[in-house]
Amino acid sequence: PGLPGLDHFLRRQEGQQRVIGTLLGRVDGRTVTVTNSYAVPCEEGADGTVAVGQDYQEKMSRLLARVNPDEAVVGWYATPGADGAPTDDASEMIHGFYAGACAGQAPVHLVVDPRLEGDAGITLRGFVSDGNGFAEIPCELAFDRGERLCLARMVRGQREPFGSAESVADVMDADEDGLALEDALRDVDALAAYVKARRAANEDVDPKVARALNEALAALPKIEDAVARGALRAETRDVLMVSYLAGVTKAQLAIGAKLHESF
C-alpha cells in the first residue's frame, strides 16, 4: 500500500495535527506484514480527550473482510501529534482501542512523519506496547518500482512545487533509468558484501547464489570487440559532428552580429 496515511494527512481538516487509520495484513509468528490501510475519523480535544470513529472502523473492517478475507486488522497508523513526538498519552488511548480490534493479537503502531523536516524525508517507525508505554520495533518498507517512483516525485513536489503538470509517461521516462541503476547498484553492493563475508569466514559461496550470478551474466548481451569499437567510433563521429555544427552556428551568429553593427 505504499506509506499509509500520506494522502490522509494532505486532506486533513484545517487545524488537525494528527490523522490515524487502520492497518490490515497478516501475522506470521513475530512478523507482521501490512498489505492495506484505510483512514479512520479521530478528534482530539483540548483537554486531552480522544474520540475515534469506532462505528466507522468496525463497518470498514467487516466490508473489507468480505472483499479480502485473508487480511485482518493488525494495528493502526498515525502521524505525529502537535508537539512532533511519535507517541503520547493520546497514542496510548488509541492503542488500547485497537487492542480490542486485533482479534487477540497485539496491535502494531506505525508512526508516519510526512513533515519533511531536514534531510530525513518521510520517516516510518514501528511500536508495540510493552505494558509501560511503547517500545520501538524494527520495520522495513517494501516498494515496487512504480510505488517508489511516485513517492519520490511526491516528496520532491512538496519541497519544490512543480511549475506544470507532468504525465505519468514523462515521469517514467525521466526517472525509470535512474531507479533501475539504483536497483542494480544496490544488488551489486549486496553481492559484494556477501562474497566478502564468505571470504573472511573462509567459507564457500552458496551454489544457488553462484548459479543466479551466472544466469545474470549470461543474460547480458554479447558484443564482439570489433562491433564495440565500431560503435564507439560512430558515437565519436556523432559527437564531433555536433561540435562542428555548433561551431559553425556560433560563427554564423558572430558574423551576422558584426554585419549588423557595421551596417
Image (cartoon, rainbow, N blue to C red):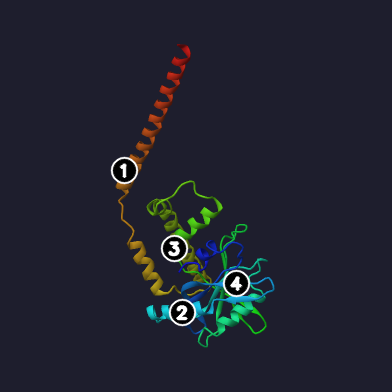
Question: How far is the residue under mark 1 from the one under mark 2?
Answer: 67 Å
Quarter occupied by the C terminus: top left
How many marks can you see?
Answer: 4
Q: Which residue is mark 2?
A: 59
Residue nearer the viewer, 108 or 120: 108
Image height of 251 relative to 148, above or below: above
Q: Nearer the viewer, mark 4 or mark 1?
A: 4
Q: Nearer the viewer, mark 1 or mark 3?
A: 3
Residue in the image at 42% along x and 53% along y: 171
Per the rendering, the mark at residue 43 is 4
12 lies left or right of 149: right
Per the rendering, the mark at residue 230 is 1
Question: How far is the residue under mark 4 from the one under mark 1?
Answer: 69 Å
Q: Which residue is mark 3?
A: 147
Residue 84, horizontal then vertical, whole percent: 65, 66
Q: Nearer the viewer, mark 3 or mark 2?
A: 2
